[in-house]
Amino acid sequence: MTSMPLPTPAHITLVQTSWQRCQPIIDTAANLFYDRLFTLDPSLRSLFPAEMGEQKKKLMTMISAAVAGLNDLNALVPVVQKLGRRHVAYKVEARHYPVVGQALLDTLATGLGPAFTPEVKEAWTVVYGVLADTMISAASTP
């Protein structure tokens, strides 16, 4: 399925616990994410609507659903594959995924502060890598 290692139960627990800690600042996290994304790659701004309110809500809902779904990867994978195929219509390319991953890690580092330990970073890196690889693979197959 992917070249990335599959998340371990410890990775899943760290991702779910740290995401739970982000819930009180979810709106701020959405702002931080898109600010960072567009700083890392300003060309990505054109892929999004001028008014970002609804997009920010969709992103946070999608991340929350994915994080909750980590306990059942067999059920989550088809949903993520469908999302990957859908993103083709939004002009998302494979080269965009690493930038999105970096923006996510930077957002978590800012939002979690000292709670963003090396172990939490590794867990998010593994989980995001698997999800991104799954989306990229699905986008490249009809």
Image (spheres, rainbow, N blue to C red):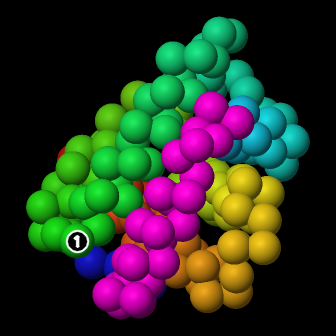
Return the residue nearer the eye: 21 or 79.
Answer: 21
Q: Tag 1's secondary structure?
A: loop
Q: Residue at x 78, y 73 (%)?
A: 114
- Quadrant of residue 125 within the rendered picture: bottom right
- Quadrant of residue 45 within the rendered picture: top right
- 31 with respect to 93 (left or right): right
10 magenta-colored: yes
98 magenta-colored: no
Q: Residue furthest right?
A: 39
On the image, the x and y values in percent for residue 25 come to 64, 41
Q: Residue at x 51, y 17 (%)?
A: 54
Overall secondary structure of the magenta section:
helix
Classify 49 as above or below 81.
Answer: above
Q: What span is in magenta?
A: 5-28
On the image, the x and y values in percent for residue 68 come to 30, 58
One can see residue 58 in this view? yes
Report which residue position mark 1 lands on: 71
- 54 with respect to 65 (left or right): right
Under mark 1, the amino acid is Asn
